[in-house]
Image (cartoon, grey):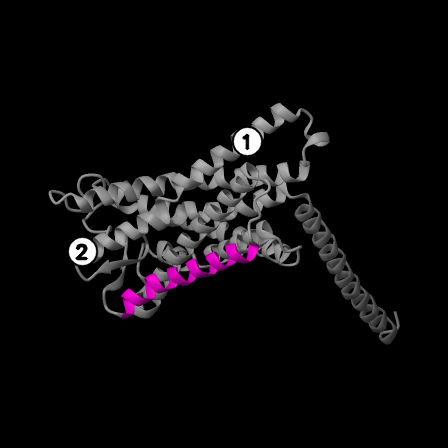
Amino acid sequence: MMDPGSGSMALSPAGDMIIALIYLLCQVAGVLFNLCSTVFFWNKKRDLPTYLYFFISLNDTITNLMVFPIIWSLWHERAAMLYSNPTLCALFGMQIRIQASFSVFLVSVLSITRSIVLVRPFKNISTNCVLCIVGIYAFYLCLNQIVPYAAGLTRFTYTKAEVYCWDHGSSTLIDTIDTVLDLISLAAPIIPITCSCIVSCFYIRAKVETCGSMDDQYDHSKRRATCTIILMTLVYIVFNIPLFINYTLWLIIELNSKWKYPEPFFTSSFMNYYSWNLVEVFFINLNSLANPMIFFFRIHTFRNWISMKLKSLTRHLHLICEKRNGRKIHVISRHKRFFGH
């Protein structure tokens, strides 16, 4: 792709500091919450939704964790910092694209499989088959980034617009192909995800109207699980609509020979220096932070598990404090005896 940071447009140091602080808060909270959900789903009974929740939580943990080079660069007026090393620049650039695409795919699988279960309740979806598809797609994403880079077809360069490393094609054709593949893997899935979400919503509503009391005539736990997936899907859609818009505008520029980036859509300072970082990093990190929040408020077993762990941690810290206080009292009493007090 072409460098989206080309051009001399005004930057706001104060805006960068605010974004860096928000990133830092999202990173600390996101890593902590997603680690908790990852451990919880790993130890839970293994069915298809649980496997997908586990992969989503693990992917979100890494997504929130790996934002630290961006925070560092924003904190130093968008200097390259870690990205100044070509190898690290390439690795971080690949990592961001692979994880963003994988996250979109996992939400797609989660939403579409739930819609299939609702529409065709007697249809048996093979967990092993779905997991194989997930594994194959993850392998494809890695190859899609590594092979062109190793073959010299693409290279990664740090850009101030995104505040991370952007991949460039060795030719205009490679740039266009890369843009289309990014559009397909990152932005286009919002269409089938939205369709499956609408199908699930209508089906749940129709089921309530025809069956009456959900508690008596419909499995309440399945309905709650479906609503959780719908909520996750809606959150994903909200955070990824801007990404879809940006990539669509980018593709229009790429396919129109009369235009050259950033004209005509990315000429303002906001669109050139902030829109890409917001849609490809900021909103994705917010989405990663939102997922464990949804798990906490929607899955009562996860909420109970968190409560149990917090109580256990509180008791452990209380015991440590008591032991330390006991040692202090013992030492003070020995000193008093020694000095004859």
The quarter of the picture where the C terminus appears is bottom right
Q: Which residues are magenta?
A: 127-150
Find residue 320 and report its horizontal and vertical position in percent.
75, 63
Q: Which mark is residue 19?
A: none
Residue nearer the viewer, 282 or 318: 282
Find residue 213 and report its horizontal and vertical position in percent.
69, 26
Disc 1 residue crowd, few under 14, some 14–19, many 20+, Cα 10 Å: some
- The span from disc 2 to disc 1 (Cα, nearest Å) is 44 Å
- Badge 2 or badge 1: first in the primary sequence: 2
Please name the residue shown 49% across and 56% down the image: 59
Find residue 116 and report its horizontal and vertical position in percent.
52, 41
Disc 2 residue crowd, few under 14, some 14–19, many 20+, Cα 10 Å: few
Residue nearer the viewer, 89 or 153: 153
189 inside magenta stretch: no
Hey, what amino acid is under mark 2? Leu
Q: Is residue 23 left or right of residue 2?
A: right
Find residue 68 and report its horizontal and vertical position in percent.
43, 58
Residue furthest to the bottom: 338
Asked which quadrant contains residue 146, the reply is bottom left
Which residue is the site of mark 1? 203
Count how many numbered circles sit on residues in the image: 2
